[in-house]
Amino acid sequence: MATAAELAALTRLDVSHDAALRETYAGAWQGLTHDEILARYGEEYTAWKRGEPVRRGGGELETEVADRAAPVVLHHADKLPDEGTLVVVSHGGTIRTTIGRLLGLEAHHWEGLGGLSNCCWSVLGEGARGWRLLEHNAGTLPEPVLGDDD
């Protein structure tokens, strides 16, 4: 919410909050470091990294995250005037799965989008045949994304 508040202050526009855009719920993995997850849930982690549908720590599947987040984005995008801009602020995993869903990619290809560095953005536009990814992880010099899901 801090990023959205900063954008609101800069643009003088209102922010609306929607719980469907929240971070992926990772169940028992929540709050653990990468090393702790590997030590406690190594097989589950390895299966997830292979692209298998895994409820990390008993939490949400990536497809469930897209199921809740993508409709919110589409709802607000449908309300935009011609040439309007919608800014969606969320967490990297939620953004990646939502972009994958909007692009019509199969879930096992979403990882190919990579992660998002903090305070970076992606730009999508509507094309004749659906959504197009125009920019991804934009805003900083190329560097590795720090996180457990890359």
Image (tube, grey):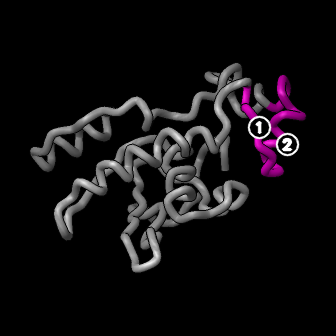
Name the residue: 46% across, 77% down. 129
Amino acid at circle 1: Val
Image position of 67 (left or right of 39): left
Where disc 2 sits, the SS reads: helix
Asked where in the image residue 33 lies, by quadrant, the reply is: top right
Magenta residues (range):
38-57
The circle drawn on residue 134 is none
Query: Residue 72: image x %, image y %?
Result: 38, 44
Query: Residue 84: image x %, image y %?
Result: 20, 63
Instruction: State the residue position of label 1.
Output: 54
Q: Quadrant of the N terminus?
A: top left
Q: Earlier along the polypeptide chain: callout 2 or callout 1? A: 2
In the rendered image, the residue lying farthest to the right is 43
- Front residue of 61/26: it is 61
Asked where in the image residue 54 lies, by quadrant, the reply is: top right
Majority secondary structure of magenta residues: helix
> Quick one: label 2, few (<14), some, or many (20+) residues within 10 Å?
few
Q: How many marks?
A: 2
> Is 135 placed above or below 38 here?
below
Asked where in the image residue 86 lies, by quadrant, the reply is: bottom left
Name the residue: 30% across, 56% down. 77
- Front residue of 15/10: it is 15
Query: Residue 108: image x %, image y %?
Result: 72, 56
Instruction: State the residue position of label 2.
Output: 47
> Is 132 placed above or below 4 here?
below
Disc 2 or disc 1, which is closer to the eye?
1
Name the residue: 56% across, 58% down. 100
Q: Contact (CB < 8 A) between labels 2 and 1? A: yes
Where disc 1 sits, the SS reads: loop
- 45 within the magenta span: yes
> Quick one: label 1, few (<14), some, or many (20+) residues within 10 Å?
some
- Front residue of 33/95: it is 95
